[in-house]
């Protein structure tokens, strides 16, 4: 599933595109699967690797979700969300997985990737709502493309968004109910 994200500066400048704000509220579950531990002597480290299943319902956030983006309300599933943690699941990690978004009138696929157990909304730039080592937080980027659509104008459109997901942390990587937000854009080439 090779989706090329719309992040090439010359493409952004040269291609004729329509940008539609996307804003979703997320609720769902994080289900643990396999785990393993790797260790190295040079450099010395211990890494916990986990596989989780992530499933969320993406619902319209009325103030910011555009008319076009409302079609993207549906179920997002990442069958294999793989995370590598520093030592254990309560420490900082990096995660990635391929997603499928199934909505009433369309289907999109792509990748999510980001960081786990960290807080980017912190002092001195933002209000003191997070700490640098905030546990139970996944932040990252979702990039995908519409592969099926009842509306031919949406087929091939891309989604580029950031997500913030709150989950119940543990030394094994977390599980249970999750909630979050997805903020981004739907990018369609002019026809």
Image (tube, helix red, strand yellow):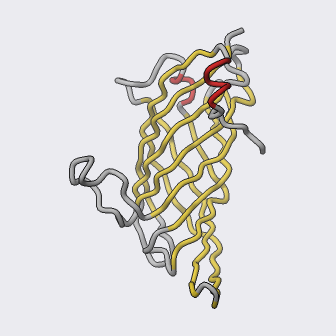
Q: Quadrant of the C terminus?
A: top right
Left or right: residue 105 versus residue 59 is: right
Answer above or below: position of 121 versus 182.
Answer: below
**Image coords of residue 150 (percent x, y):** 71, 19
Residue ID at (40%, 56%): 166
**Image coords of residue 51 (percent x, y):** 63, 67
Left or right: residue 67 versus residue 126 is: right
Name which quarter of the figure residue 142 lies in: top right
Answer above or below: position of 98 versus 35.
Answer: above
Residue ID at (50%, 38%): 58
Name which quarter of the figure residue 154 lies in: top right
Residue ID at (29%, 57%): 130
Determine the residue located farthest toward the top in the rendered image: 191
Determine the residue located farthest toward the bottom in the rendered image: 41
Residue ID at (57%, 25%): 186
Name which quarter of the figure residue 187 lies in: top right
Looking at this view, is 79 or 135 the one in front? 135
Looking at this view, is 158 or 44 the one in front? 44
């Amino acid at each position: 599933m090779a989706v090329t994200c719309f992040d090439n500066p010359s493409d952004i400048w040269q291609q004729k595109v329509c940008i539609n704000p996307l804003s979703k509220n997320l609720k769902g579950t994080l289900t643990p699967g396999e785990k393993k531990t790797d260790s190295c002597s040079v450099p010395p480290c211990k890494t916990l690797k986990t596989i989780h299943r992530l499933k969320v319902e993406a619902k319209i956030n009325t103030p910011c979700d555009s008319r076009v983006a409302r079609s993207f309300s549906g179920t997002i599933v990442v069958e294999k969300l793989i995370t590598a943690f520093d030592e254990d699941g309560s420490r900082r990690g990096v995660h990635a997985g391929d997603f499928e978004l199934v909505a009433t009138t369309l289907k999109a696929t792509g990748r999510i990737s980001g960081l786990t157990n960290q807080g980017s909304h912190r002092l001195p730039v933002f209000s003191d709502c997070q700490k640098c080592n905030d546990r139970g937080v996944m932040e990252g980027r979702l990039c995908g493309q519409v592969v099926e659509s009842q509306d031919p104008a949406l087929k091939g459109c891309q989604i580029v968004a950031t997500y913030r997901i709150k989950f119940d942390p543990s030394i094994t990587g977390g599980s249970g109910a999750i909630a979050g937000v997805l903020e981004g854009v739907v990018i369609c080439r002019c026809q």
